[in-house]
Image (cartoon, rainbow, N blue to C red):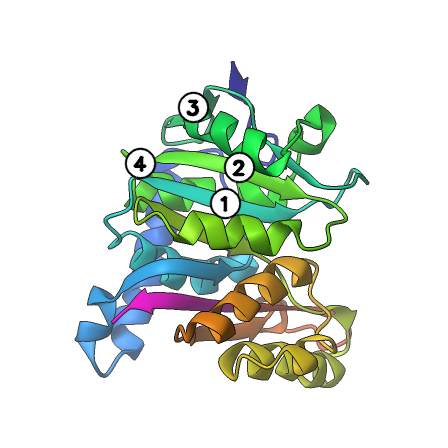
Amino acid sequence: MTRVAKNSGRFYSSSCDEIRDQISHFNRLLENALTKKEFLNKEARVIIAPHAGYIYSGFSANIAHRLLGNSKAKRVIVIGSSHYVAFRGISGSFYTRYASPCGDLSIDTLYLEELAHTFEIGFVEEAHQKEHSTETHMPFIKHYSKDRAVIELIYGKTDKQLKQLMEFLLQDRDNALVISTDLSHFYDLETAQRLDKHCLDGVFHKDLELLTQCQACGKAGVEAIVAIAKEQNLNIQLLDYRTSYDTSHDKSSVVGYMSACICIE
């Protein structure tokens, strides 16, 4: 059974050729902006990346996914918040394949079943029917890590479950993590940048108090990975920050986007 890509043609193109062209465009912009090309050799173990339409957040997400592509992990676990269905806990994509325009990705169902038993991960089917916070990452994973298996985890209201799960996942070097989030939504540009600074500084300084003031839709996931990084003395590097203004040039109502990574030194 395949997890259908309901956001294909909406948040990203339904054409594989167009996605490849767009990623090539992002990479040309990135390479032209770099002063140290060795940056591109970094190997990300965990990335925090946005999930909006590619025309708005694709550049930011692409940087993180390019570094994640250098990882030697065998599977990528994509963790995102539920935008459409309210539920408690974490839901896993209990399918066998995950559709994307450049070809399906394999879902590691055996590993997901092991996680489900240990962490009481359920299956809220309607949560997986059109969730974009996880789906928008799959074409990037297919592009950079085409032979790796994936797991989609969507969370609703959680307490310590999310952090405990991430701690467990990071004990296995075969796992790479994608923590999906956008930042503030629909404020004017000046307000958005001020609010987003709490998120950026909170991540960079691993300051959980600052993160309480962050207005990110995936804040629970960000807080969990930052808490782990703080406890385990892991370095988090900010990769990019932008808003929808950079594309739309509309200052009246913008959305913020950040990408960051925990890279292997």
Residue stretch in magenta = 259-265
Marks 2 & 1, CB-CB < 8 Å contact: yes
84 horizontally vs 60: left or right: right
Q: Is residue 261 left or right of residue 117?
A: left
Left or right? Give the position of 224 relative to 111: right
- Amino acid under label 3? Leu
Query: Residue, x 50% and y 60% (percent of image)?
Result: 49
Residue 152 is labelled as 2
Label disc, if present, on residue 148 of the rendered structure: 4
Foreground of the two, 30 or 68: 68
In the rendered image, the residue lying farthest to the right is: 86
Query: What distance separates the C-alpha of mark 2 from that of mark 1?
Result: 5 Å
Q: Earlier in the sequence, mark 2 or mark 1?
A: 1
Label located before the other in sequence (3 or 2): 3
Q: Which residue is mark 3?
A: 110
State which mark lies toward you, 4 or 3. Answer: 3
Mark yes or no: residue 107 visible.
no
Dot 4: few (<14), some (14–19), or many (≥20) neighbours within 10 Å?
Answer: some
Mark 3 or mark 1, earlier in chain: 1
Eye-nearest disc, 3 or 2:
3
Asked which secondary structure carries label 2, the reply is strand
Check contact, mark 1 vs mark 4: CB within 8 A: no
Separation (CA) of disc 4 from disc 2: 13 Å
Between 209 and 2, the residue placed more toward the observer is 209
Dot 4 or dot 3: first in sequence order is 3
